Image (cartoon, rainbow, N blue to C red):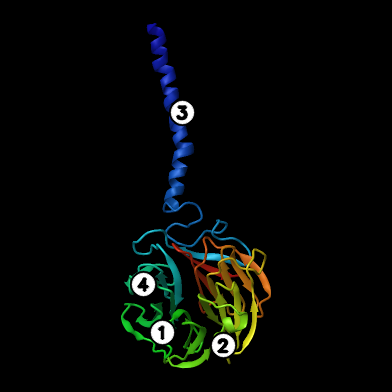
Amino acid sequence: MKATRWIWLIVVIPLLVVGVVIALVVFLIPTMLRTDATNGRGPGFLPGLTKPAPGSKDQPAGFASVTLKFGTEGIGPGMFKDARSIGIDGSGKIYVGEYTGGRVQVFGPDGRFLTQWTVDPKMPLRGLAADRKGTVYTVQRGQITRHEGDTGKDLGEVSYGGGGGFDDLTMSPDGGFVGAWYSNRDDIVRFNAAGEVTRTIRAAISSTSGDSELNTRVAIDGLGNIYALGSFNNAVFKFGPDGKFLTRFGDAGDQAGQFRAPSAIAVDGKGRVYVSDIKGIQIFDGNGRYLKVFKPDGMGFGMVFNDNNELFVVARNHVLKYSINE
């Protein structure tokens, strides 16, 4: 018995120790290194950066590639709970607004958190846009209000003779902006850079479709054509710079070019129209011909292009930046 016990101690136990060490080397240490290299964010992220690595699930090949991703679920700096609107100024600063709570966070062009400020926390933040000078426009309580982008300082409401009723707005290339307005009638109102009304398209959607529209999102291209996305009509309505109706496209359905719960619209530098809904982001040419679709990580509730024709999408708890490859 004693001889057997000594054989166990001298031969078997060292073999067990060697086996444990090998297991640590083969399985545990590489896992720890992978986790450290990605800062705990899992595969697809380079150390210390928010740029998805080539070949990750966040950077699909094809029409659009993710070149920047930032944000996560939370209430801390750089985190989001209900982000649905986004704007970019001339220097590339990114402004992200939360629908509930009224928080607006400011990020550098590389996605690094800079600061934050708050508008009315009791009212939904329906829309947000930024001009080239860094002035941020917000839509709450049906009113459009200007803010100093770096501090959130209130610069005053935009005066409109029709009163409150704005749902959304977008900046135009000439420094003005376009607002979607509803008060018993779905109008589109165009303002110059001084905030003066230059054109009103009365009953823009309902006069064309025959159905009232209670939630309109707007976009404008480089030629001044205005695109109005009617969420209840499940369609896009295009108007010329003179306010004349030109065409409509889209319909309710699950086929290519049809919409289910559309939520955002944007136009790129080539005049292509992007519409986000539960199926992804569908792309059309300026006349409404369906081109293709791609699926972002999450549903895009707000979209905007910068001067480099890069698309920014805000999806509730994160922001994605896409390079358009075609």
User: Does dot 2 land on a helix, a strand or a loop?
Assistant: loop
Pointer 4: what residue?
123
User: Which marked residue is nearer to the observer: mark 2 or mark 1?
Assistant: 2
Front position in the image: 317 or 41? 317
- In this rendering, the answer to whether 166 lies above or below 319 is below
Pointer 1: what residue?
133
Q: Residues within 10 Å of mark 4 (few under 14, many from 20)?
A: some
* Residue 218, image x, y percentages: 52, 79
Q: CA distance from mark 3 to mark 2?
A: 71 Å
- In this rendering, the answer to whether 2 lies above or below 180 is above
* Residue 112, image x, y percentages: 39, 67
Q: Residues within 10 Å of mark 3 (few under 14, many from 20)?
A: few
Q: CA distance from mark 1 to mark 3?
A: 65 Å
Front position in the image: 54 or 135? 135
Q: CA distance from mark 3 to mark 4?
A: 62 Å
User: Which marked residue is nearer to the observer: mark 3 or mark 4?
Assistant: 4
Q: Residues within 10 Å of mark 1 (few under 14, many from 20)?
A: few
User: Does dot 3 land on a helix, a strand or a loop?
Assistant: helix
Please report whichever mark, 4 or 1, sits nearer to the chain's N-terminal start: 4
Number of the label disc, if any, that sits on residue 19 = 3
User: Does dot 1 land on a helix, a strand or a loop?
Assistant: loop
- In this rendering, the answer to whether 9 lies above or below 63 is above
On the rendered structure, is 72 left or right of 244? Answer: left
Query: Residue at left 52%, top 66%?
Result: 300
The residue type indicated by label 3 comes to Gly
CB-based contact (under 8 Å), mark 4 and mark 1: no
Q: CA distance from mark 2 to mark 1?
A: 20 Å
Q: Residues within 10 Å of mark 2 (few under 14, many from 20)?
A: some
Please report whichever mark, 1 or 3, sits nearer to the chain's N-terminal start: 3
The residue type indicated by label 4 comes to Met
